[in-house]
Image (spheres, rainbow, N blue to C red):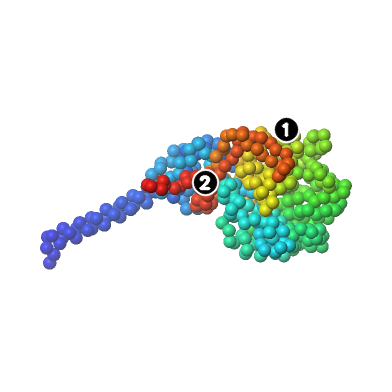
Amino acid sequence: MKTWLEKISSWLKHVGTLFLLLAGLHTATAQQYDLLLKNGHVIDPKNGIDAVMDVAIKGDEIALVQKNIASDLAGQVIDVSRLYVCPGLVDIHTHNFYGLDPYGQYSNGYSSIHPDGFTFPYGVTTVVDTGGAGWRNFVQFKEQVIDRVQTRVLAMLNIVGHGMKGSPYEQNLNDMDPKMTALVARQFPEHIVGVKVAHYSGHQWEQIDRLVEAGERANIPVMVDFGGANPPLSLETLFMEKLRPGDIYTHIFGGGGFGREAIIDMGGNLRPFVKAAQERGIVFDVGHGGSSFAFKHAIPAMEQGIQPDVISTDSHMSSIMSGMKNMNNIMSKFLNMGMSLNDVIAASTWIPAQVIKRPEFGHLTPGAGADIAVLNILEGNFGFTERTGMGKMMGKQKFETELTIRSGKVVWDLNGLTAPMWDE
């Protein structure tokens, strides 16, 4: 038989175990969220939020967005006071099919870039590679890039089966196969969100007709990067007759040189059909690139009532070293050209998500994936260029990404907001 001391000892052990279980249950109950962003100015265009609020994350999802969420409900609390909290940015014009083919250019070549180093530092969590791969090599692109990086990479197939390998590939009408392009697009609906044509030179419309046919077969939008023609092909015909509502015209503030019309004429006036085209539903995409943006087109167009629907980078090896630089730099340009903060955020999040028919992205609705950009707006004197050695515009404000969260995990922390002091 147990002595009275043994009985008391046994009883105390049970009490201790119960106490630990209750304490653990209390902790589990108290910590409803994994991560809590406190006191940030939330801008979520889809949900009409433009106010100081807290954002709670559980696992890889947004759990709650409201004022004054108790700090003791979260495992980790990050103070984002005086910063802007918005959905992870969605960049629908990039070139990420990088590889070692010395002749591949943007299709398994040296001109494309590994996305992660040029997305997360600028708040971008989703990109669309536009035309790097065609139906012939999309599987290689998926296995080589999409399946191996942290950034969410989607794709617009090139109507050219070999993808964006430059000449002579992009000039080969015989390799522009709407049936095969649509077949592969329907085979990979999780990854393929559109079809693109680029750089085709010739005074004809066959390349556009085949592009649109592929889009119709796969029920996805198309993107046009006009090539050169002499005389130039008509933008009015493209906008009002060839493209469908929801289709995308990229490099909206480019053109104007040999072979390609700009939306602004030589006198600085907006061409009369441009507003009607935007009202018809043609999507105007910035697609800044290395030489596809000019202030002489962008500033007069905006003064005459045209804003881009979508802000995107056209990021590749040369554009990141020129006037484009990164997503934050382009957003800053438009903020300084008079576009409102809400419109800049919308054109970088919710609107592009809708354009590519992915309404699950670009917002902070509870239950949505926890992709978040925490942005700072710096005040000072900043210069913004078109491209290296070309025109410059000065501005007073500049975006900088403090924190990027992808699927509930911090993937970029510029100033250590999530870290304790080293001596604590």
Residue at the spot x=70%, y=57% of the render?
A: 106
Q: Label 2, secondary structure: give it.
A: loop
Disc 1 target residue: 303
Label 1 close to label 2 by CB (< 8 Å): no
Q: Badge 1 local density, few (<14 within 10 Å), some, or many (20+)? A: few
On screen, residue 319 versus residue 55, left or right, reads right
Locate residue 107, reporting x and y percent: 70, 60
Locate residue 295, reporting x and y percent: 73, 38
Which is closer to the viewer, label 1 or label 2?
Answer: 2
Q: Badge 2 local density, few (<14 within 10 Å), some, or many (20+)? A: few
Q: Does residue 46 show up?
A: yes
Q: Amino acid at mark 1?
A: Glu
Q: On screen, 305 above or below 57? A: above
Q: Earlier in the sequence, mark 1 or mark 2?
A: 1
Locate residue 406, reporting x and y percent: 53, 51
Disc 2 target residue: 414
Q: On screen, 125 above or below 399? A: below
